[in-house]
Image (cartoon, grey):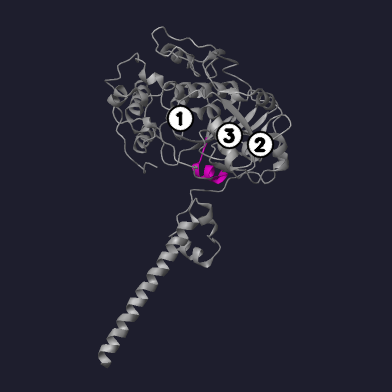
Amino acid sequence: MKIVWKKGFVRLVLVGGILWMLLILIALLFHIWSCQSSVSFLSAMCNKDSKVYTMLDTMGLVTKPHRCPIPVSNDPDKIVIPTERTSNKVVKKLLYVTEDEVPNNSSESSPLFGGHISWKQREESFKLKSNMKVHCGFIQGGGAEMDPVDIKYVKKCKFVVASGIFDGYDIPHQPSNISLRSKKLFCFLMVVDEVSLEFMRENTTVKEDNAGGKWVGIWRLVLLKNQPYDEPRRNGKVPKIITHRLFPQAHYSIWIDGKMELVVDPLLILERYLWRGKNTFAIAQHKHHRNIYEEADANKRRKRYARPLIDLHMKIYYYEGMKPWSSNKKTISDVPEGAIIIQEHTAVNNLFSCLWFNEVHLFTPRDQLSFGYVAYRLGDAFEFFMFPNCEYNSLFVLHPHTREHSSPIEWVKQLDQLKKNSNLKESRGGLGLFTPYPGDLNSVVLPQITRTSKAG
């Protein structure tokens, strides 16, 4: 009896010890997960100053956020703003096409926001001249109209922090660490559609000033009526890429995606990324990809757009001489992280933005795929500073969307699906993918992709 009792007691102790260790392990794993969760309730439970977290960090069990210190100045009040604008050396005068030329054989008779750009017009737009006239959205009758009260307000904005929310996917996140000087200097402009405005009224506080302007905290809402595209993601490219068309008086602008919370003073951002290095355009490097063909492959795996249309888009670029990125190229990457764009609105930068938007208008709405191509076509005339991705992550707090976006065209795997079901196609965007191309794309074989990272 004594032997049996001792063996049973030993087993009880062993089983109890194992269960206790499992509970401790589960608690540690939950602690790690909560500290890296994007859910505010869970992240609030995390105590990163605790001895437990420090021990786990030392053991290498905590995944480090992809961040690094930003060498910004300490005091926004001491920043010296340049008194003179950067001179326009290559393009001195830039005009925009405002009336659409609808082809006789086109099934689309009404004006398109980006215009019915022909292949010849597209090619001519890349030939740099002193005086240029290009398509750049905002074709008469194409949609995206601003209220008169908003047009009047933005005329005073020389320094702009711009963002946008479409189809109710986010609510505005209030910036932090903003100096009094920047609050007076910058206009914080949030471009929205009717759906997002209604969503904000239901889920946050929207105030109205005496002039009729709408505000959510520091953000002045700018309503765009009559959305130009069927696809909300494509609508979001309007304020993102052709910011200078919405806010023509702006000398400098910082674009941030609607899901981002800015945590660095915008004046310090301009000094760090533009004025200190005498740059006029800055954008972050993509975290994973440098090659647009690898990025296209990742977009197909993530179902970000119809797979055959992404392939067709890439075939056009490869046919037109866009080689995969290599260390022999002058740029450190062909793929940006497009959630932030920092720029002075010079003529060349405005031209680049117009041509970049035209590619998004004609082909897929995945702007990371067309950025490098337009930079390649403009060559040395367009200079930009691509800064490390870890700095980009130090500028913001990333919040999840209020809901996931999905559209039918993202699930298309074969071109036959589009031919059989016309409802899958966009009616006002991406029409270049369905316009006969003046070249033999059937003979184009896309370069082999080596997958260097996960899809997303």
Q: For residue 215, which numbered disc appears in the image?
A: 2
Nearer to us in this view, 125 or 173: 173
Pointer 3 local density, CA inside 10 Å: few below 14, some 14–19, many at least 20: many
Answer whether labels 3 and 2 touch (C-beta < 8 Å): no
Task: Give the CA distance from mark 1 to mark 3.
Answer: 25 Å
Task: Give the CA distance from mark 1 to mark 2.
Answer: 29 Å
Pointer 1 residue: 367
Q: Is residue 432 left or right of residue 392?
A: left
Residue 171 at x, y = what percent? 56, 40
Residue 330 in sight in this render: no
Residue 293 in sight in this render: yes
Q: Nearer the viewer, mark 1 or mark 2?
A: 2
Q: Is residue 162 left or right of residue 184?
A: left
Q: Which residues are magenta?
A: 386-397
Q: Quadrant of residue 295?
A: top left
Callout 3: SS: helix
Task: Give the CA distance from mark 3 to mark 2.
Answer: 11 Å
Is residue 391 highlighted in magenta? yes
**Sequence order check, earlier mark of 3 and 2:** 3
Work out whether 232 lies above or below 32.
above
